[in-house]
Image (tube, rainbow, N blue to C red):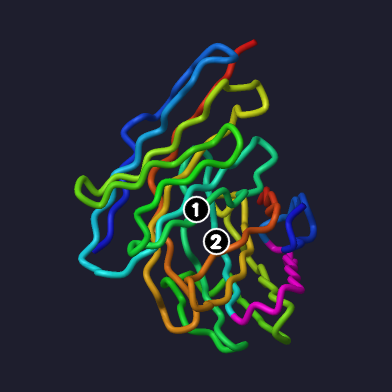
Amino acid sequence: DTEVTQTPKHLVMGMTNKKSLKCEQHMGHRAMYWYKQKAKKPPELMFVYSYEKLSINESVPSRFSPECPNSSLLNLHLHALQPEDSALYLCASSQWDRSGNTIYFGEGSWLTVV
Amino acid sequence: AQKVTQAQTEISVVEKEDVTLDCVYETRDTTYYLFWYKQPPSGELVFLIRRNSFDEQNEISGRYSWNFQKSTSSFNFTITASQVVDSAVYFCALSEREGNGSRLTFGEGTQLTVNP
């Protein structure tokens, strides 16, 4: 079982709604990520948090707002989304050690915007 | 810029056949990390293996084996005696360090279907 947990598993929201995706890890990792994956495509990086600070924003529209309340939690706040934002949203975490860095993913949140 | 190429978009085999998934990468880094992930229909990306560029030793884990060849920039994945449960999309990925994190460059993925 994955040690990165995401909620909710499925979310349907209207274009005027505000919702949030949540992610939690207890592996002591200090880097956390949000990826977006469309059908039949590889995941695309959205945001990276390092030591609770945003270190990478891949030019993501402001209707996606990440938040890292502490080293174990990562949220993605959603507002005024478009139908084309419907996708699988994957959270991940990692930590460098002497041998390298492995990124572990959660089960994902399937988002449908109607 | 980094690039990962998985030339096989789809592979279909019959159970118990051996199957090899190809992965070719490009990078200018002297130190890099290669990964294979499995993604079943449920969506989770399951980590299978990480190989560091300075470690060319091939690895076997049960029915899975990986062949890393720096000379040809390839990191191929073989499943021996395939099973229906192996049906999934498999991604090869290359990472570069970004501070305390990493940036993963994925290949387009290979859809493996194992038929009974």
Q: Position of residue A93 (x, y in %)?
A: 62, 70
Residue named by callout 1: A43
Chain letter for mark 1:
A
Q: Nearer the viewer, residue B28 or B60?
A: B60
Q: Residue at x 55, y 84 (%)?
A: A50
Image quadrant assignment for residue A79: bottom right
* Element marked by disc 1: loop
The quadrant the C terminus of chain B occupies is top right
As drawn, is B69 to the left or to the right of A42?
left
Asked if residue A5 can be seen in this view, the reply is yes
Taking depth in this image into account, of A42 and B17 the one nearest to the observer is B17
Q: Amino acid at mark 2?
A: Tyr
Q: Are marks 2 and 1 in contact (CB under 8 Å)?
A: yes
The residue where tag 2 is placed is: A35
Counting from the top left corner in percent of width and height, residue B51 is at 43, 57
Look at the image and give the residue range highlighted in magenta.
Answer: A16-30
